[in-house]
Every structure is written in structure tokens, then in C-alpha cells.
């Protein structure tokens, strides 16, 4: 358009002349010079964007565009300068009030001798059109993303518009489906008298809704929930809108629920518990077979009665209030007493819940006969009282703590010993009654170290309320609930101040005896040896007897010392490899008594829990078998074996049978009488050591002579 003329006389200078042809253009119009500056605008342009003319003319057009449109303008303006024109170019323009509008712009160039002079542009406001298009796209996407099938039918029941979901059911596309007959409309019409579809088209019905079953090529058999409504456009009905939802699974569940309800009714009637439904007045609406059997009424009698006649504890109107206040899906449990037709009172546990029965709110109650439970509860209460009486009558102090070692109970003996009432120390840590934190930590370590033991004993230093401290022998065990879970600890505490003092005195006497006796016996033995050396005959014989007796006395005193040391020790069991220990003992005995013939059958790895002094007891048995032999070559057999339950140590000899008194010492720990010789003390020590190792001693006499002493230790 090289020689186009225009109302703008100067191609480079804005014109503000009035009444030019541009003002008769109905659409907004502007002209641009080669730099993109606005030469002129018409009144429609000013009216649309809201600027004053002198605010616009002479400015670069890009200043009136939103940022996102500036680059587009620069590109399309260059195109305008080199082509015959551009069309349908969309820009976002800024209005004077700050609003943004979308415009569609067409432009043609004007040339002078082949040079671009100006561009003439007009545009239309398409903001509303774009918004409608956006809404339409959103609606289309929404419709196609629906889980329901959406469709518009014409007056003949043909598809006009369908969404993708429905098209998939027919294994086709929406475009191919449109214009074809619907298989649903005839099926729906069959459910009604007359022509309900036509009634929708005539405006005689507002909607049709219900269920229908149909088959689809791409979906198979389905149960559908449908809703049909008239499509109104500008007040006239132009078709029918249909929405269908596949409820096949829901329908199947409903059928299952109906079956389950029927089965539930059979189950309720087969229950041993009484069950019934009552309304807000308390009248029975339905009862099960157990109610008839347990209460002694016929079904007809019961359904003519109310719950108030069965449960005298109910107040007037209480059931109506209960229905009003009871939350849905909540079961309320309580106990009451029912009265049977014969007058028998039956304690029951009621479980009640709110239900809908034949469209009305009602209560379903299940009553369980708890006569036996009540009897058991009474028995448990009696047992509890007996246990509480036993707990309170035990003379040793008892302290009960939770798993955090906080005090939860104690018996009167604890109060007597420590001076604290339960309320003074309840919930306090057990450290409150320990002499120091170190003692508290020591007991904690002991508890952790005996996690698999049913109980153990530990000596702890405690502090009374008065501040006095004392040693307490504490038998600790785990406090468990009915399921065997650990819920705390039980400590039985005995003040052993007197015992420790007696042991201290015993040890002191033992030391004095050892010292004085050994010194005096050394003097006696020395004189006896001198007499034996310088004399002959009867006097020398007397001296020999003195030496022999002094040796026996020394051995007796040594065994007495062993017993004293053992009694004063902690006497705690530990795991020992008994087989290896016995092998070492046998080796020592062979060196000490070379004439003795000791045969063995020992499992070296055999182990058991015992006090460490168990080796002293085995040594005593070996030595006792050797020194009491009548033969110069004692025959001894030692065996060590073990199974899953116990470890067995056997010492056999060919000596005369062990005297009855010494058997009693070994087997029963019978007190050693003054007439017993030193071996009696040794056997007493054996019994003490084995007993403190939780073991047993057995003695068997073999024929024609001989003995077998067996020690059994728990494995």
C-alpha cells in the first residue's frame, strides 16, 4: 500500500485534529510511525482504555501493553513493516484505571515510494470472549474428567454431546457417538407409566432419577444411577441433560448388606445372649430367641411389654432421654439386673447402641448373663482380702515399685522398719529410702543383670526416716500383671544388722581360735615329738597318740574355719565349668595321695550354676573317700555328666558304708553333735554348699561294700 492516503497529514507527527475519518471507525483505532510511536487514536480507542488523547499520542505503543505482550508487539510490528499486514494478533493492554484487557488487533502498512510510513491498526476487546472460552475449556475438561457419564440428549433421545467417560463405555469417541440413539432412554422409560421423557421435554417433570441396568461394549454389565433434567436455553427446553454413575459395586454391597442383615438376624436369634430392640417409650419392638428362653416369656408376651417391666432400675422417661442423648456409632456398656417371669433376678451386662429400626430411632441392647462373673468377682474380692491380709501380716518389710522405680505400695512391716507411712513416700523414687545414690544405682544394675531371673537377693544399705542406716537383705522379684508383663518390682527387705554382727563376732572368735589353738597345738606337738624321741615303750606310745590326736584336732579346726568362712560369704551362685574344676581337683589329689587309684569319666565342658565353694565340697568328698579307705590303695571313681535338666557329680569308693549319723549330716544337714568327729563337720560343709547352690545330695550304699555320693546341680 505504497500510496495509501490517510487522515493523518504528517506521517511522523501525532495529529489531534477533530472530526477526522478515524473517529467514524466503530472499533478502536490507532496509527503508528516506523518507531512504533502512536500517531493518532480515535474516540473508540480513548473510550475503551480511558486515557486522555494527549496522554497517548506521541508515546511508544508498547508502554500501553502488559509486560508479557511487549515482546509479541515488537515481533509482530516488524512483521507489519515488511508484509502486507497482520491479523488476529492478541495483546494484553493496560487501561488507565489499572485493569487489563485482551484485544485482537489487525494491522495494515502504509508505504511511500517503498518506504514504510505508518501502520494502521484497529482492534476489538475480546476479554469477555476469552474468559468464556476459558470457562468452556474448563467445563469441557471438568466434564471429561468426571467419574460420571454426562450427556445432552435431543428430543428423540439421541446423543448431542457426550463426555469422554461415556464414550469409553461404548468403545468409541465423543464425536462418533454424537447423533446416535441412546440405549438408556428406552430402559428408563420402561420403569414408568406413560412417556416420562416427553414429559421432561414438555416441562411437566422437573427431573427423572433412579437406577437402571444396561450392557456396554467397553464396560460390560453395569448398574447405573441416573438423573435426567430438562436443558433450558433462554427459557425454552432444547433437550435433556443426563448424568449417570456406575454404582455396580455399591449395588453389590447393598445386596451383601441385605444378605448380611438376614444372616445377622439368624445370628442374633442363635445367640446365647439376650437381644432386643426398644423404642423411645421402652416398648419391645423385637426380641431374639435367647430373650424368650432366659426370661421365660413367650415372644408375644415380650413384644407386648416394655423394658421397664424387665429392669426395675430404669426411671420413667430414661430410655427416651437415652435415645435423645446417645451419640451414633457408640456402644454404651453398663450393668443392671433383669427380672424373669418366675421372679429370678439375673445380673446382666448391657451393651446398647442407637440404630434405625423401620425408619425410627431405636436402641439395640444385648444383655449378657454375668451371674458366673459376679460370683467370680466375689471370689476374687475374697482372695484379694486374703492376700491383703497376708501382705499386711508378713513380718519382713515389702516395698512395691513401678517400672520407673517409683514407690506404689508398702506393707505395715515396712512402716515399722523405716518409719514412713505409704502416703509420705508414694510416687517417690525408691532412692528415697536408700542410704545413697550409689546404693540406688547398684540395685538398678542388679535388676538389669537379672532380667531373666524370677528373683535374686542383694544386700543394700538403707536409710530410715530417722536417718539411721542399716544393711537390708533384699529379695527382689519382678511384679507382673495377669498376662505376665512386667509392671514393676517387689522388694522384700530384712534388717540383717544382727546377723552381720553375729557373723562378725563369729569371724572374730574364729580368728582367735585359729591363732591360739594353732599356737598351743604347735607347743603340744613339739613336746610330744620330744617325748617320743627320748623315750621308749609305753610313754613313747602315749606321745604318738598325742601327736595323732593333735593332727585330727588341727584338721577339725581347719574345717570349722572353712564352714565359718562360707557362712560369712555372699553365697551367690555363678556359672562354673564344673567338669574342668573337677579335673583339676583330681590332679591335685593324685599328687597329694599317690597311693590312691582315682579313675574318672568327666565331661570337661559340663557347667552349672553354683556358689564358688562347690569345689571345696567336691574336694571334701574326694578326701573323705581316700582317708577312710581300709585299703592302702583306695579305689575311687569320679564322674561328671550333664543333661538338659541337671549336672551330676559322682564320687564312688569301696569303703565301708557311711555311718547313719554322717548320712544324715550329708542328706539333711543335721546339726553336728559334740560326739561327731572332724569328718562330720566336713560333710556338713558339703551339705551347706550344695544347698546354697540349689542342688541336692544323694548317698547310695553299694554291695557288698562301698558308697556313691552324688551331687546334682540345676543346669
Image: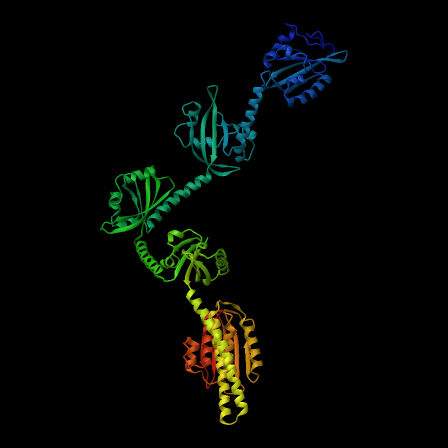
Q: How many marks?
A: 0
Q: Residue at x 58, y 16 (%)?
A: 97
Q: In this rendering, does residue 496 appear at all?
A: no
Q: Residue furthest left?
A: 342
Q: Position of residue 318 (x, y in %)?
A: 28, 40
Q: Residue furthest bottom?
A: 537
| Vertical arrangement, residue 381 with respect to residue 29, above or below | below
Work out whether residue 164 or residue 453 is closer to the camera in this orientation and state it. 453
Work out whether residue 457 or residue 124 is closer to the camera in this orientation and state it. 457
Q: Position of residue 429 (x, y in %)?
A: 45, 53
Q: Position of residue 349 (x, y in %)?
A: 32, 49
Rendering quarter of residue 462: bottom left
Q: Residue furthest right?
A: 113
Q: In this rendering, does residue 243 appear at all?
A: yes
User: For this view, does 714 lie left or right of residue 583?
Assistant: left
User: For this view, does 229 lie left or right of residue 123?
Assistant: left
How is the rendered protein coloured?
Answer: rainbow
| Vertical arrangement, residue 316 with respect to residue 114, above or below | below
| Vertical arrangement, residue 326 with respect to residue 410, above or below | above
Which quadrant: the N terminus?
A: top right
Q: Position of residue 607 (x, y in %)?
A: 53, 70
Amino acid at each position: 500500500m505504497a500510496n495509501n492516503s490517510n487522515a493523518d497529514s504528517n506521517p511522523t507527527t501525532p495529529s489531534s485534529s477533530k472530526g477526522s475519518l478515524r473517529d467514524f471507525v466503530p472499533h478502536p483505532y490507532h496509527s503508528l510511525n516506523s518507531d512504533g510511536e502512536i500517531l493518532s487514536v480515535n474516540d473508540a480507542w480513548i473510550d475503551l482504555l480511558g486515557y486522555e488523547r494527549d496522554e497517548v499520542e506521541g508515546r511508544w505503543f508498547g508502554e500501553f501493553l502488559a509486560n508479557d505482550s511487549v515482546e509479541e508487539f515488537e515481533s509482530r510490528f516488524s512483521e507489519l513493516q515488511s508484509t502486507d499486514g497482520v491479523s488476529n494478533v492478541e495483546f494484553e493492554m493496560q487501561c488507565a484505571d489499572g485493569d487489563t484487557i485482551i484485544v485482537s488487533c489487525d494491522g495494515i502498512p502504509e508505504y511511500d515510494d517503498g518506504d514504510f510510513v505508518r501502520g494502521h491498526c484497529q482492534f476489538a476487546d475480546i476479554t469477555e470472549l476469552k474468559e468464556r472460552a476459558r470457562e468452556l475449556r474448563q467445563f469441557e475438561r471438568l466434564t471429561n474428567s468426571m467419574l460420571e457419564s454426562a450427556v445432552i440428549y435431543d428430543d428423540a433421545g439421541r446423543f448431542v454431546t457426550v463426555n469422554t467417560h461415556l464414550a469409553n463405555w461404548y468403545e468409541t469417541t465423543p464425536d462418533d457417538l454424537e447423533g446416535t440413539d441412546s440405549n438408556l432412554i428406552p430402559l428408563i422409560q420402561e420403569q414408568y407409566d406413560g412417556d416420562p421423557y416427553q414429559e421432561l421435554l414438555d416441562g411437566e417433570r422437573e427431573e427423572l432419577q433412579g437406577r437402571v441396568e444396561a450392557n456396554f461394549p467397553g464396560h460390560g454389565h453395569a448398574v447405573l444411577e441416573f438423573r435426567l433434567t430438562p436443558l433450558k436455553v433462554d427459557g425454552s427446553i432444547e433437550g435433556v441433560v443426563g448424568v449417570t454413575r456406575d454404582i455396580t459395586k455399591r449395588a453389590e454391597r447393598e445386596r451383601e448388606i441385605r444378605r448380611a442383615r438376614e444372616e445377622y438376624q439368624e445370628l442374633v436369634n442363635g445367640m446365647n445372649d439376650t437381644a432386643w430392640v426398644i423404642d423411645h417409650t421402652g416398648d419391645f419392638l423385637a426380641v431374639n430367641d435367647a430373650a424368650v428362653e432366659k426370661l421365660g416369656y413367650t415372644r408375644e408376651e415380650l413384644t407386648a411389654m416394655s423394658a421397664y417391666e424387665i429392669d426395675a432400675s430404669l426411671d420413667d422417661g430414661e430410655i427416651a432421654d437415652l435415645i435423645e442423648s446417645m451419640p451414633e456409632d457408640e456402644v454404651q456398656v453398663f450393668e443392671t439386673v433383669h427380672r424373669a417371669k418366675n421372679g429370678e433376678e439375673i445380673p446382666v451386662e448391657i451393651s446398647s447402641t442407637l440404630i434405625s429400626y423401620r425408619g425410627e430411632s431405636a436402641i439395640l441392647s444385648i444383655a449378657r448373663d454375668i451371674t458366673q462373673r459376679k460370683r467370680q468377682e466375689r471370689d476374687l474380692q475374697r482372695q484379694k482380702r486374703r492376700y491383703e491380709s497376708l501382705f499386711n501380716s508378713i513380718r519382713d518389710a515389702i516395698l512395691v515399685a513401678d517400672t520407673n522405680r517409683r514407690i506404689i505400695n508398702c506393707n505395715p512391716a515396712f512402716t515399722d522398719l523405716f518409719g514412713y507411712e505409704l502416703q509420705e513416700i508414694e510416687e517417690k523414687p525408691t532412692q528415697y529410702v536408700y542410704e545413697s545414690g550409689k546404693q540406688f544405682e547398684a540395685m538398678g544394675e542388679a535388676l538389669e543383670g537379672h532380667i531373666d531371673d524370677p528373683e535374686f537377693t542383694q544386700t543394700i544399705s538403707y536409710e530410715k526416716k530417722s536417718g539411721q542406716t542399716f544393711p537390708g537383705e533384699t529379695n527382689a522379684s519382678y511384679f507382673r500383671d495377669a498376662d505376665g508383663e512386667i509392671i514393676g518390682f517387689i522388694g522384700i527387705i530384712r534388717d540383717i544388722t544382727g546377723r552381720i554382727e553375729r557373723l562378725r563376732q563369729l569371724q572374730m572368735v574364729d580368728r582367735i581360735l585359729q591363732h591360739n589353738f594353732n599356737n598351743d597345738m604347735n607347743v603340744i606337738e613339739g613336746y610330744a615329738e620330744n617325748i617320743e624321741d627320748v623315750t621308749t615303750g609305753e610313754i613313747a606310745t602315749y606321745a604318738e597318740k598325742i601327736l595323732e590326736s593333735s593332727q585330727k584336732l588341727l584338721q577339725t579346726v581347719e574345717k570349722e574355719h572353712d564352714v565359718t568362712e562360707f557362712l560369712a560369704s555372699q553365697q551367690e551362685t555363678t556359672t562354673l565349668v564344673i567338669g574342668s574344676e573337677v579335673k583339676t581337683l583330681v590332679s591335685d589329689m593324685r599328687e597329694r595321695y599317690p597311693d590312691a587309684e582315682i579313675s574318672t569319666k568327666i565331661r570337661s565342658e559340663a557347667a552349672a550354676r553354683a556358689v564358688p565353694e562347690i569345689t571345696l565340697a567336691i574336694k571334701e568328698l574326694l578326701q573323705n573317700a581316700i582317708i577312710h579307705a581300709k585299703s592302702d590303695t583306695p579305689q575311687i571313681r569320679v564322674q561328671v555328666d550333664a543333661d538338659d535338666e541337671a549336672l551330676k557329680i559322682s564320687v564312688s569308693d569301696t569303703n565301708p558304708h557311711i555311718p547313719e549319723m554322717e548320712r544324715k549330716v550329708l542328706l539333711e544337714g543335721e546339726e553336728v553333735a559334740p560326739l561327731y568327729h572332724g569328718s562330720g563337720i566336713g560333710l556338713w560343709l558339703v551339705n551347706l554348699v550344695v544347698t546354697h547352690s540349689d542342688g541336692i545330695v544323694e548317698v547310695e550304699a553299694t554291695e557288698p561294700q562301698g558308697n556313691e555320693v552324688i551331687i546334682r546341680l540345676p543346669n
